[in-house]
Image: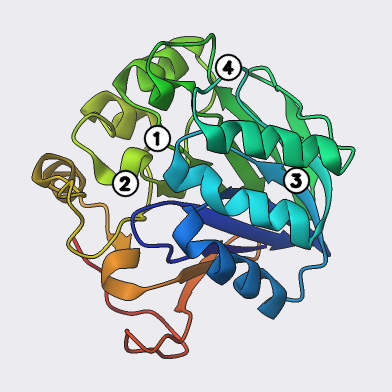
Amino acid sequence: MAVHFIDVGQGLAILVQSGGENLLYDGGNRAHADEVVQYLKNQQVETIDYMISSHYDEDHLGGLVKCLDNFEVEHVLGSDYVHTSDLFNTFMNTATAHAIIVEYPSVGDTYEFGTGSFTVMAPDGISQNSNDNSVVIRLVNGNNSFMFMGDAEETSEQDMISTGMNLDCDVLSVGHHGSASSTTWDFLEATSPSYAVISCGINNQYNHPSADTMGRLSDMGIPVFRTDKQGTIIAVSDGTNISWSQEPCDDYSSGDSLSLIHI
């Protein structure tokens, strides 16, 4: 199982490939849509078995519209709320045009995928805060596990903890690009990740990731990979071990293995 944390600047896009199947979790913003489509084509993607829109903010949803138009998409999972943006309407209309009905999963729903499966961990209810409506999944491959957080913040994290579900993971895709409003002490203790990955833009206007979040990760001894520092980052799980590599990119040094870890 290969998990590609695609460098989409200040946004999030994750491609997972396993057993001949493809899962796309978010698609970055509209400005990076062509890059996401080309990246998937470079990975020989023809069919997206699961497209997951964590929530409907532009920096997560923008690229998914173009992916709907460029690939065969079997299932689209999304959060059951209505966003006021034109982009949200475009996304829904594009899905309808391709005869796709957006599915709204419930907490605890589990889907077989490739050599493993994923379980929906959030949201349990709909909030006025769009970020806390993020569809969070825990992806499992053998003894390895990944948590994809979207922009989920502290309220959603506490809701997940209160369910008593297994939140343990090897790799945490840090919520909300490393914002101080996510990745609480309680949640880090509940998930106990061996690695963290932060997707954010170089010198972004929000100053993500925050010093508070980086401090908590550092204090817990969790090594951090960052797309703004290292470009696209790839984790490959054989069910027991996870190896890391870096997609060659003009803006970053590249190599067969990724040894540089930012804490």
Image quadrant holding the N terminus, namely bottom right
Q: CA distance from mark 3 to mark 4?
A: 19 Å
Percent position (x, y) of residue 149? 45, 37
Q: CA distance from mark 3 to mark 1?
A: 19 Å
Q: Secondary structure at mark 4?
A: loop
Q: What residue is rendered at 50% in x and 14% in y?
A: 164
Q: What residue is rendered at 38% in x and 89% in y?
A: 250
Label placed on residue 81: 4
Q: Nearer the viewer, mark 4 or mark 2?
A: 4
Q: Nearer the viewer, residue 218 or 99?
A: 99
> Residue 115 appears in which quarter of the rendering?
bottom right
Q: What residue is rendered at 27% in x and 59% in y?
A: 223
Q: Nearer the viewer, residue 140 or 109?
A: 109
The residue to which callout 3 is attached is 50
Percent position (x, y) of residue 186? 27, 24
Q: Nearer the viewer, mark 1 or mark 4?
A: 4
Tell which circle, 3 or 1, labels the residue nearer the N-terminal end: 3
Q: Is residue 249 above or below residue 147?
A: below
Percent position (x, y) of residue 197? 37, 55
Tell which circle, 1 or 4, labels the residue nearer the N-terminal end: 4
Q: CA distance from mark 3 to mark 2?
A: 22 Å
The residue to which callout 1 is attached is 151
Q: Secondary structure at mark 2?
A: helix
